[in-house]
Image (cartoon, coloured by chain):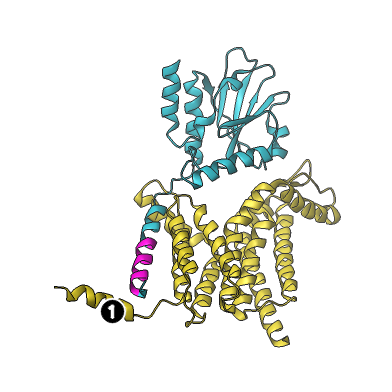
Amino acid sequence: MCWFPRVLSASAASAPAMSRGELFTWLACVLATNQLFAVPSASATAFIDAFVTGFATRSIFYYLGWFAVFRLLYEGDPQTRPTRTDVAFVLLITMLNFLPATSVSWVSTTAFGLFLFATRPRADHKFQAAAAVLLALAFNGFWGPLVFDFFAFPLLRADAAFVGGLLYLTQPGMSWAQTIVGTPEGHSVLIYGPCSSFHNVSLGLLCWVTITRLARTDWMVKDVLIAFAVCAIVVVLNGTRLYLMALGPDYFTYWHDGFGQHLFNWATAFGVLFASLWGAAYFERAK
Amino acid sequence: MSRTSLRAILAVLLMMTIATKTQVSANLSRDKFTGNVLDVISAHRLSTYPVPTRDLLPAAARIAAPGCDGTIDVIPVHINLQEAPLFDTFVKPNSTRLFAFLDKTWSSEDRIGMRLTWLRHRLLSFVGLGHFSNSTTGLLIASPAGCAAALAIDWAPVWRSQPATEDAELIGALR
């Protein structure tokens, strides 16, 4: 009867140790699934509805970001073994995700990215690239909205000043006051938080970081130019949409609730995707 | 630790963390929020008037309070007060404005104060000690000049995690 434990321990001892990449892939699984499943709901059926809705409404760049993280971790050096610190960190972050708050997985994603950066001397470049994408995901999903929430009104006023300035220069009688653009007596538009350029800027930057890190793992100074181009595309397109909405009630209906809304979303997505792909390909050739 | 046992531990932990996330409490819906506001008002034995329907800055309740020269409007607003440019248009002139969010009230627009209150309770809920629902909707209470009825109301039950009716019943029992 004593042979069974001995066989178990012998097979355990002979089994190859888990690679660092696989260990971190497990942690990425925990974080990604916790973000996908953290959907507020009152009942089981409501949970399924909320999960499907949440899954469908997330941006394609969010899924692209997680795909990049898994791919970069998979492509890491398979010979590198995790240290005790790595295992302790992964278990600690996983245990932290037992807390019920939805923000835990986002804070954990940030900690994961920072940990990969902090272990730079031992890590290969693939892990560094995965860290950059993790931080971009956390910025888009958690820190960006948090920063926006604190400075929402000044940021909305900046949007209004940009659009109102364009209206003032091109349309007689139109101007802006605080976060309202249009004509004082006629049609005017109040800019709410979801209409701000800031939201799409963080999504555009996530796309840029993901595409760039998938193309190559080392940063170049010129990458910053592409980041500025992505931000400019988002701000100009969003400003144009707000400008058109302020022109009249029909324009507002088309660009806010009608086909124009989809047109704007697709134009923004293709714009930032094209700029990111062009930047990755161009600077790769120029190296 | 062998690869197999570590995989097993991580797989079990993964499933268990997902199970905890399916228990995340729902955000306050607009209807539920309005219902909570009405519960708080009825707990203070104040009567309400029909609320005029409008797309911009709709009120959750219109209260008739004794000793007040007019009605009190209770209007849901985002805590970043992005609706502020509309206040002068839709809130009665010469009215006294009170802002309420969670367990605090402000006598003037205080975006930072409201956001810090939100952050404090988010941090508490992060470690499982939160007492309020996850919400970024506050209240603007516009009272006629000289009317102090709104000041006497504790608005915190509107956001309390437990049903507002339980708080309302408690207040009613204490009276």
**In this picture, which residue range is highlighted in magenta?**
B4-14
Spot the residue most to the top.
B67
Quadrant containing the C terminus of chain B is top left
Q: Which residue is drawn at 69% across and 78% down?
A: A279
Residue A32 seen in this snapshot: no
Q: Where is residue A22 in the image (x, y as percent from the top left)?
A: 44, 75
Q: Residue at x 43, y 45 (%)?
A: B25
Instruction: Please name whichever residue, A273 or A88, is drawn nearer the observer in this view of the structure.
Output: A88
Residue at which label 1 appears? A11
Q: In this view, does B165 lie to the left or right of A170?
A: left
Q: Is residue A64 magenta?
A: no
Residue B28, placed above or below residue A218: above
Which quadrant of the structure image shows residue A283? bottom right
Q: Which residue is drawn at 19% across and 74% down?
A: A4
Q: Is residue B137 left or right of residue A195?
A: left
Give the amino acid type for the residue marked by disc 1 in the picture. Answer: Ser
Residue A274, placed above or below residue A252: below
Q: Where is residue A117 in the image (x, y as percent from the top left)?
A: 60, 69
Q: In this view, does B73 lie to the left or right of B125?
A: right
Q: Where is residue B76 in the image (x, y as percent from the top left)?
A: 59, 36
- Label 1: which secondary element: helix
Quadrant containing the N terminus of chain B is bottom left
Instruction: Please name whichever residue, B77 or A40, is drawn nearer the observer in this view of the structure.
Output: A40
Instruction: Please name whichever residue, B96 or A191, is drawn nearer the observer in this view of the structure.
Output: B96
The picture's colour for chain B is cyan
Q: Residue at x 63, y 38 (%)?
A: B114
